[in-house]
């Protein structure tokens, strides 16, 4: 078995992100806002960029305000490319 076909030693591991659930109105789908801190290319100031990810949550267990960890996956629908791996912290 070569490294490309062995799923344990994957050459390009799937991305993992952490964010906050913004919406859970859809069935089995969450909208998660992921913040990223990047340095401005010209001015050097640190700026925050927010990206909204559509996440598959088959059990409908996460609610708005929860901090969740998501993992990249194959396309599940037109917009869904991520799946819920764990709920890190529940909303207060």
Image (spheres, rainbow, N blue to C red):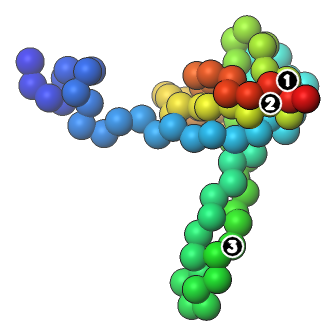
Which quadrant would the N terminus be assigned to in this image? Answer: top left
Looking at the image, do the residues carrying marks 2 and 3 touch, with CB atoms under 8 Å apart? Answer: no
Q: Residue at point 31% right, 39% down?
A: 12
Residue linked to disc 3: 47
Above or below, comparing residue 73 to residue 41 in the picture: above
- Secondary structure under tag 3 reads strand
Report x, y in % for residue 60: 78, 13
Q: Residue furthest bottom?
A: 43
Looking at the image, do the residues carrying marks 1 and 2 touch, with CB atoms under 8 Å apart? Answer: yes
Q: Earlier in the sequence, mark 3 or mark 1?
A: 3
Residue 19 position by quadrant: top right
Q: Residue at point 51% right, 37% down?
A: 16
Q: Which mark is residue 66?
A: 2
Residue 25 position by quadrant: top right
Q: Residue at point 62% right, 22% down?
A: 86
Residue linked to disc 1: 63
Query: Can residue 42 be seen at all in this image of the molecule?
Result: yes
- In this rendering, would 89 be left or right of 7? right
């Amino acid at each position: 078995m070569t490294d490309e076909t062995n799923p344990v030693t994957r050459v390009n591991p799937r991305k993992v992100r952490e964010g906050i659930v913004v919406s859970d109105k859809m069935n089995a789908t969450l909208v998660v806002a992921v913040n990223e801190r990047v340095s401005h290319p010209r001015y050097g100031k640190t700026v925050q960029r927010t990206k909204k990810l559509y996440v598959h949550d088959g059990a409908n267990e996460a609610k708005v305000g929860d901090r969740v960890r998501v993992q990249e996956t194959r396309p599940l629908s037109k917009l869904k490319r991520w799946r819920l791996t764990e709920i890190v912290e529940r909303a207060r």
